[in-house]
Every structure is written in C-alpha cells, then in structure tokens.
C-alpha cells in the first residue's frame, strides 16, 4: 500500500492505496465521486477526464499514486457556490448531451480547450474534443455548446 | 381571482431538457455508481477460442486467492440457472449463460468469479486455467450455410437458424409461393440491375458499457436487479422466470442508462448469472463490463449479405425487385436476434410502388458474437440494399437519381398503402421530402460544383437516398413482449403532477417531452410535472424503449392517461364551481369557466378537494390518478431524404464527407431540439458505418477489432456540420400524430454516402462499392485494381 495526499475539489484527502489503483477508481470508489466515468480500457473515450493541476487528464491512465500532491478537479467540483460553470450552462442550453455518460469528461476536456483557445474556431473545437467519444449527439450540439461557453461574459 | 402568468404552449417548442442538471454536474446514478453494503464483485472468464470443446477448467488457484468468495464453472452455473430463453418464436439451440462443454464464440463465458473487489475478481479470473480443444471456426457466412467447415449446433443442419423464408408478391400466409408475377416482371424488364451487397457488422458501443447489480434478499424472498437496460419490465419477466420467482418478487431498475442503441434490449448472460449468484449466496453482487469485454460480450448489429435484382423499364419505372437476404447472426439466438432481419425483409418495398417484390430470408449461425438490435435494426439494411439498387438503375439509365425515385414513389393519395411485403404504410408524402432535400442542398448548384471540381481533377461525388422505416413498434400481434405501452398519471394533493411511463429512456429526453405534453394538457407549469421511469417498483407496467417507440407509443399512453385524470378532475371542479364540465378550461394553473375568468379556481385547490372531497360528488371516488395501456393499431412509417457530397483523395483514397443534408419526416414533433439531437446521433452512426466502423473477424474466428484502438468510433473531427430540416406528415395511427425519430438518421445516410463515393469514382467504371469505405479499398479502385468491386453487369 502507498500513502497519498491529494486535494480534490478543494478538499485535502489522504489515503492508503494499492500502487496499481487507477486514479479514476480512487475518485469513484474511495471518494465516491462517481460523476467521473469509465467508458473504455484503452484511453480512447475520455469519459474519465478530470483536471489534474488545472489541465485535463484521463484519470483511467494515471495511477492514484501518480496524483500524489496534485490538485484535482472533477465534474462535481466545477460549479462554484451553487452556480453552474458556463460550460455546464452551455451544454444544457444547447442540448449538448443525451445519455449524459460522456458529458462530465467532455466538459472537463472543454475547460482546458477554452483555456488554451478562448475563442476557438469550430475546427479547433472539433480537434480539441477528438479524444472524447460521444455516441449519442453526433457532436454538433456539443460543438455549439462549447462555442456558446466561449462567448459567455464571465468564465 | 388568482393571478397566474400566461403559460406558453410547450408542445412543439425547443424546451431545454429537465434531465440535464444532474447529468452536467456528475450527480446522476448509473449502474456502476450503485454500491450496496456487503456487495461482492463478479468477473467472467471468457473463451479465447472461437469454437472448441472444453477439456478442463482448473479453478484451484483462483478459488484459493485472498478475497475470493466463490468460483463457478459452466457446470456449476447450470445447476442454479436454466438455459437462456429467447423472445422470438423461432427455433433455437440450447444456450447456457456460461458454456458447459462447447464454446462457440471468442468471449463466451466459461467461468465466473465472485470476489471482494473488482481488482481481486479480475486477478482471480486471470488465474483460472482453461483447456479447450479447438474445432474449425465457422466465419464466412455463405460457406457456413453449406455446413462448412463444420456445423455449430447439431440440430441446425448447414448452420441454418432460419432457412429461406419467402415474403412478398405471390407468397401466401401458409408459405406457398407463386412466382408468376415476379417472373413476368423480370421477363418484361428492359433493364435489370443485379448486385451482391454487404451491410457489415457493427459494434453498438454505447459509451456506458453494460453493468448489473443483483440483490437477492433471502429474508424477504425478493430480488432487486439494477441493470443498464432499455427495458426493465422485460428484464423483470425473464429474471423472475429463470430464478423461479414471481414477477411480484422481482424489482428491476434501469437507473441512469448511458446509451443503448439497441444493444441493451437483450437480456444477457451476465444479468442472469449475477441474479442467480446473488440468490445462491444471499449477498448483493455487481458486474461491470470492460470495453474490451463489450466488444465480444455485447450483441453486434447488422451483418446481412443481399443478392439484389431490380427489373425496370428504360424510362425508370421499376417492375420488380428480388432480394435474397443472408444474415450472419453469430453463435446463438438472443432475445430478438432472429426477428431483426425480418424487418429488412418487411421493408423491401422502400418508398416505391413496386408491383412485384420477393424478399427471401436465411439466417445463419457462425462462430461470432451474436447479433441483435442495433439502431435501425433491419431497416437501414433494407434501405441500403434498395436505395443502392435504385442508384445503380439511375446510373445505368443516365437519369438523375432524384428522377428515378420520383417516378416510382408511392403517391400521397395511396395511403394507407399495403406493400407487397406485408407492411401497411400509415401516411407519407415522399415527393415533398425529396423536393425539400433538393432545395436545401441546392441540388442543381451542387451538381455544377461537383462538375467544376472534377474539371480540376478532383474526385467529388454526390449521393441521394430516400428512406422509409417501420417505427412505433408495435401492435402486440407483432411483438411477443406485447406491443403496448403503459402510463399512470397522478395529480398529487398539492396540484403537482407525477406520471410514470414504461418507456425507459437512456438519452431520449422523455422526462422533458412527456412533461411538455402534460403541462399543456393540464395548463400547469412544466416545473410542476415529474416523469418517473425505469423502475418496476414504481412503474407498474411497461415494455421499454426500442424501435423508435417512446413518443409514438409511450407518449400516447401518457396523453390518454392524462386525459382520463383530467376528465375526472373536471368533474370535481364542476361540482366545486357548480358549473358544467364541458364549460371548463384548464389554463395558467387554474380551472375556470369559459368566458368567466373571474370564476377560476387554482388548480391546486381543485386537487386538494379531490383528495378531501367533502362533499363527495355523487358517483365519484376520491383521488386523481389513472392509467392507460395504449395498444397501437399499426406501426408508424417515418420517412425522409438524405443527400451527401464526398471528396476522395486521389493519392490516398481517403474519403471526406463534405456535406450531409437530411430531411426527416417523423410526423408531429413534440420537442424539435430533442428531435434534432436524435437525428444528429443517428446520422453520426450511419456515417460511421459507411466510412470508418467495421467489426472484423479473422479466419480463425478471432475478433480483430476488439478495442477502440481497432474499432473506429467516430470522433468530432469525422463529421461536417449536418444540415437538417423536416417535413411534417402526421400519422393517423395515434392521436399525437407522432411517428418516432430515434433511428431515422441511420437509414438514409449509408446509401447516400456510398452512392456519392460511386459517383466520385465513376471515371474508374465502378458501379458499386461495399461499405465500409476504407481508404485502401478506394485507393485500389483508383489504381485500377478494383474491378472486383464493380457490378456484375
């Protein structure tokens, strides 16, 4: 077992974990933060995307021990003081989700996308979410949502 | 007089979804989020051989591992679980949830582990030693139907699950066949198109893999099963039956479900096994599918070969169609496996008034993962075969592909239209959809653009496809599960409304669309309506969500149950207000007398009166709750037209989809925003099938596309912006006029893309190319190596 200390959604957490424990399972099963999902086992689908030290990362491809000392934000920590993040608002407004399973990862990826490209072109958005699968929407409403969020006054 | 804001009518509006707040905040509960005290984890050991006899399974090491609760072989499971049933009236070989002596596809379960957590369970599954004597793998479907290289199920000679069932012109209900009309059509033909086509195998790939939590409570003798399913009531029926329980003793819950696309209709081995193990051990157990498991363990879709012959006159009039269908159904019959290709057979008439049609169906076992429903389920295959043939006819006659279609359309005045293959189309105006597609795509200009691009040496092509599908499944005569849907609507004591629906959504947005309908019906705010679903402990009866039936069948049940409650509430209001029921209007959160707004009572006060009815009006029972079972008299038949433009890189053969215009007619639309989303998703899966997705098996029956590294699931960069529009031809089959839209996008898209590719490659003399359109295949054609891809003319 290995000792780790991470800050998750602003709260410091310490745990003894198996060295092979995936970060996503640490979040989901140890901390019961089940908004982060697992949709594949080859790092393709992106449903497990969280922010590690402010950058999007696929939490199925990191061991929990690798996150030791890191600051992690999951979908549950994105809204602040009961106010939805502009991306959450935009996904709702633009019907950017159907079954919702890919949505947390898609939104967390979009956070980094908009940090890198505050006014992205459609192609930049499509490139930026190419590591996240959605089987329901055909992506068009997701693209619309990210465009909408990029125009939000406060982000 | 109560002052209420004027409430807008919501049906037909782009209302944003009420499901979304929990989903965008990570607060929804999917199966893998369910955790029960004392819950054990299940892992399956699966065969890595496609076909073979099990010699020995050594579970010693696994059973001895710390944290392992139990290990079961197929023989052990057979003691606690009968063979798996199917949901169709076709003959079927015995199918054990865990193989006992023979394995018939890679990924078939051979043993089961129950352990403390998922890591230990997987370690233990890895430690099980399985010794299998390989048998020849049956992979090629047309070879399989001659019994070669071997027969998979001894009772099914030549691997035929369903042998040469004829349908269409000259076929009587008792199966007698008169070929004269068909032979005459071909004898009178001035041109005949003949083509072998393949509609290849796909992996449905809902982003949430399947999962089960089963909890048998020995003290109560009841079972609760959570599953990522499209139809919890059907699940309940089968779980009860196989565990020797009554349906009253089983509660099935479909919590948040992360996509289905047809593959979560089937009741799977893992659901049965988890329920039986929970019952045997008396503890809750959970299993969650890995993606690599999903590729072998979750049913595949499509996989039909067709030999198509089309007889026509030189002016484009189609005289006859012969379609010989051969479906590769994999190793076993699952819930609906055998029925899916019958929908291909049934839709052979397409949108055309073809006087003589014969579609003949053969279903064949192979050593592959079984097939079952996948979005469209039989209708995309029919559309692909007929529309490709129509396009080949247009090319052969040098006619505009739109003109050939138009010449043969069933005309609006001919509805209801009984086809040659037994369908009765409810309503349609195919010319209108075609006209709008041509207008929106700017067809003439598009042709000029293509020609201009070609003049520059670019390989650009245009494709057009019509489609008609069978939706709103369906009358009980057509569905062994029952073809109705159920709803219960309750006006609560505080005037809020709750409603249950047997339609069990997994992304379709029923919580919003059904609430829109009830809010309008009762004249109350949307926020005062809650739609409950997906739990047989809450929803008394139901069938489920498949075949684009939620709105057409489930929505109608909601509408009818709402109407019953409303009429009872009107009686209470009439008594309270000393008015006549017929004069009452429900609007803006009040019930009032028409023309006398000052008299209006708050909706909630009438509700309160109904629950404390002093005095109780004569002949009335207290309360405001009623139910409806809606049994449709027919299916619905949505239709549309899709147009695409494709460019192929001359150097690499890589195709790029430049444009996709879709006109879809789903009848009345309750929420156009949600409808758009459904069409986008369907188009994406159709484009995916045509251009990048394909399940591939090796000659040894090994799945070569067993992960997302090998199976190309479409990404955002694979699509242009889809251009949608709609015509609206309501169905007379239900009072809403709604036809269903969930699968539409998968129908027109594949043939219109393939036709565009054939158009783009026309300079190479190609008349047909089968999907999927991998660059290598197109490159070979460009290099002059592709003659075999052409027609047999």
Image (spheres, helix red, strand yellow):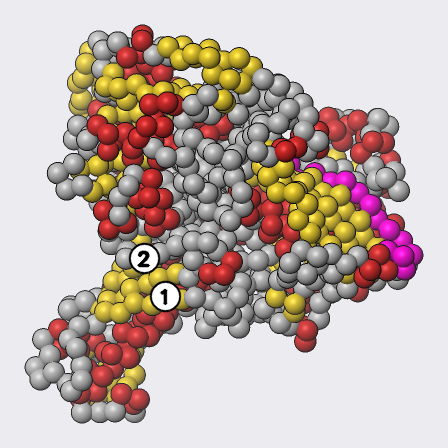
List the single residue furthest toward the left: B614
Q: Quadrant of residue B371?
A: top right
Alpha-carbon span between mark 2 and mark 1: 9 Å
Residue B397 pos. (x, y %): 88, 54
Q: Which residue is mark 1?
A: B629
Both marks 2 and 1 on one chain: yes
Front position in the image: B41 or B176:
B176
* Image-based side of B693 in relation to B500, left or right: right
Q: Residue at x 24, y 29 (%)?
A: B280
Chain assignment, label 2: B
**Above-or-below relation of B97 to B66:** below
Does the magenta segment cover residue B192? Answer: yes
| Residue B50 visible from this viewpoint | yes
Identify the image quadrant of the C terminus of chain B: top right
Chain assignment, label 1: B
Mark 2 neighbour class, 10 Å CA radius: few under 14, some 14 to 19, many 20 or more: many
In magenta, the rendered stretch is B185-200
Residue A40 pos. (x, y %): 43, 27
Asked whether the beta carbons under mark 2 and mark 1 sit within 8 Å of each other, the answer is yes
Which secondary structure dominates the residues rendered in magenta? strand
* Image-based side of B8 in relation to B674, left or right: left
Q: Residue at x 33, y 44 (%)?
A: B241
* Image-based side of B735 in relation to B458, left or right: left
Residue B251 pos. (x, y %): 26, 46
Q: Quadrant of residue A20?
A: top left
* Image-based side of B3 in relation to B670, left or right: left
Circle 1 sits in a helix, a strand or a loop, which is it?
Answer: strand
Identify the image quadrant of the N terminus of chain B: bottom left
Q: Which residue is mark 2?
A: B541
């Amino acid at each position: 077992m290995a000792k780790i200390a991470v800050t998750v959604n602003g709260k410091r957490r310490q745990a003894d974990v198996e060295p092979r424990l995936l970060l996503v399972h640490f979040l989901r099963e140890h901390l019961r933060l089940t908004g982060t999902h697992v949709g594949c086992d080859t790092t393709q689908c992106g449903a497990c995307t969280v922010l590690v030290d402010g950058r999007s990362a696929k939490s199925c491809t990191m061991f929990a021990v690798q996150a030791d000392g890191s600051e992690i934000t999951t979908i549950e920590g994105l809204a602040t003081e009961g106010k939805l993040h502009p991306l959450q608002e935009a996904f709702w407004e633009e019907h950017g989700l159907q079954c919702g399973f890919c949505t947390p990862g898609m939104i967390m990826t979009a956070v980094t996308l908009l940090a890198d490209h505050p006014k992205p072109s459609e192609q930049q958005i499509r490139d930026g979410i190419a590591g996240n699968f959605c089987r329901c929407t055909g992506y068009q409403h997701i693209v619309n949502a990210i465009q909408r969020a990029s125009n939000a006054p406060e982000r | 007089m109560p002052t209420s804001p004027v409430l807008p009518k919501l049906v037909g509006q782009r209302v944003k979804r009420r499901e979304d707040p929990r989903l965008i905040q990570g607060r929804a509960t999917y199966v893998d989020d369910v955790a029960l005290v004392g819950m054990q984890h299940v892992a399956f050991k699966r065969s890595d051989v496609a076909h073979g006899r099990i010699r020995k399974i050594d579970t010693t090491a696994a059973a001895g591992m710390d944290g392992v609760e139990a290990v079961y072989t197929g023989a052990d499971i057979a003691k606690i679980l009968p063979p798996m049933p199917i949901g169709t009236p076709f003959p079927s070989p015995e199918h054990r949830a865990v193989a006992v002596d023979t394995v018939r596809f890679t990924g078939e379960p051979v043993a089961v582990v129950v352990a403390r957590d998922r890591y230990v369970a997987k370690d233990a599954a890895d430690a099980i030693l399985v010794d299998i004597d390989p048998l020849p793998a049956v992979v090629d479907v047309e070879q399989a139907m001659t019994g070669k290289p071997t027969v998979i199920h001894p009772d099914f000679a030549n691997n035929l699950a369903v042998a040469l069932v004829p349908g269409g012109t000259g076929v009587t209900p008792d199966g007698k066949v008169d070929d004269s009309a068909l032979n005459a059509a071909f004898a009178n033909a001035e041109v005949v198109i003949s083509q072998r086509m393949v509609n290849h195998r796909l992996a449905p790939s809902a982003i949430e893999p399947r999962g089960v939590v089963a909890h048998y409570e020995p003290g109560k003798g009841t079972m609760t099963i959570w599953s990522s399913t499209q139809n919890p009531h059907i699940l309940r029926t089968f779980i009860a039956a196989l565990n020797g329980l009554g349906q009253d003793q089983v509660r099935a819950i479909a919590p948040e479900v992360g996509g289905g696309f047809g593959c979560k209709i089937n009741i799977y081995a893992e659901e049965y096994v988890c329920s039986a193990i929970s019952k045997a051990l008396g503890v809750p157990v959970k299993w969650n599918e890995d993606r690599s498991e999903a590729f072998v363990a979750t049913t595949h879709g499509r996989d039909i070969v067709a030999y198509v012959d089309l007889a026509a006159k030189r002016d484009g009039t189609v005289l006859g169609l012969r379609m010989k269908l051969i479906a590769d159904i994999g190793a076993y019959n699952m819930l609906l496996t055998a029925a899916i290709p019958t929908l291909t057979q049934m839709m052979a008439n397409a949108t055309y008034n073809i006087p003589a049609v014969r579609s003949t169906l053969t279903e064949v076992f192979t050593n592959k993962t079984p097939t079952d429903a996948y979005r469209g389920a039989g209708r995309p295959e029919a559309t692909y075969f007929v529309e490709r043939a129509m396009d080949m006819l247009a090319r052969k006659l040098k006619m505009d592909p739109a003109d050939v279609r138009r010449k043969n359309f069933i005309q609006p005045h001919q509805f209801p239209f009984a086809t040659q293959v037994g369908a009765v189309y409810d309503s349609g105006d195919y010319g209108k959809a075609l006209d709008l597609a041509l207008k929106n795509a700017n067809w003439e200009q598009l042709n000029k653009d293509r020609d201009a691009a070609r003049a520059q040496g670019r390989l650009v092509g245009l494709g057009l496809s019509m489609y008609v599908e069978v939706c709103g499944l369906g009358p009980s005569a057509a569905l062994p599960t029952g073809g109705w849907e159920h709803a219960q609507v309750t006006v609560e004591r505080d005037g809020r409304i709750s409603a249950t629906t047997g339609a069990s959504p997994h992304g379709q947005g029923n919580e919003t669309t059904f609430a829109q309908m009830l809010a309008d019906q009762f004249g109350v705010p949307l926020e005062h309506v809650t739609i409950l679903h997906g739990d047989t402990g809450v929803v008394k009866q139901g069938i489920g969500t498949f075949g684009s039936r939620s709105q057409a069948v489930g929505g109608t049940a909601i509408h009818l149950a709402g109407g019953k409650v409303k009429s009872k509430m009107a009686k209470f209001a009439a008594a309270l207000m000393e008015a006549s029921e017929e004069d009452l209007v429900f609007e803006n959160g009040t019930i009032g007398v028409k023309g006398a707004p000052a008299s209006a009572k708050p909706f909630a006060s009438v509700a309160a009166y109904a629950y404390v009815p002093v005095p109780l009006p004569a002949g009335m029972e207290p309360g405001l709750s009623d139910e409806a079972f809606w049994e449709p008299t027919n299916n619905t038949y949505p239709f549309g037209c899709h147009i695409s433009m494709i460019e192929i890189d001359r150097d690499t053969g890589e195709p790029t989809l430049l444009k996709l215009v879709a006109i879809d007619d789903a009848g009345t639309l309750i929420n156009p925003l949600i409808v758009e989303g459904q069409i986008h998703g369907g188009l994406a899966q159709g484009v995916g099938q045509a251009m990048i997705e394909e399940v591939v098996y090796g000659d040894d029956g090994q799945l070569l596309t067993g992960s997302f590294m090998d199976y190309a699931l479409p990404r955002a960069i694979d699509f242009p912006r889809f251009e949608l529009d709609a015509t609206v031809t309501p169905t007379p089959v239900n009072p809403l006029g709604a036809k269903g839209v969930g699968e539409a996008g998968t129908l027109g898209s594949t043939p219109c893309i393939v036709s565009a590719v054939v158009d783009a490659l026309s300079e190479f003399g190609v008349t047909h190319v089968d999907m999927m359109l991998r660059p290598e295949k197109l490159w070979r054609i460009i290099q002059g190596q592709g003659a075999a891809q052409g027609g047999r003319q």
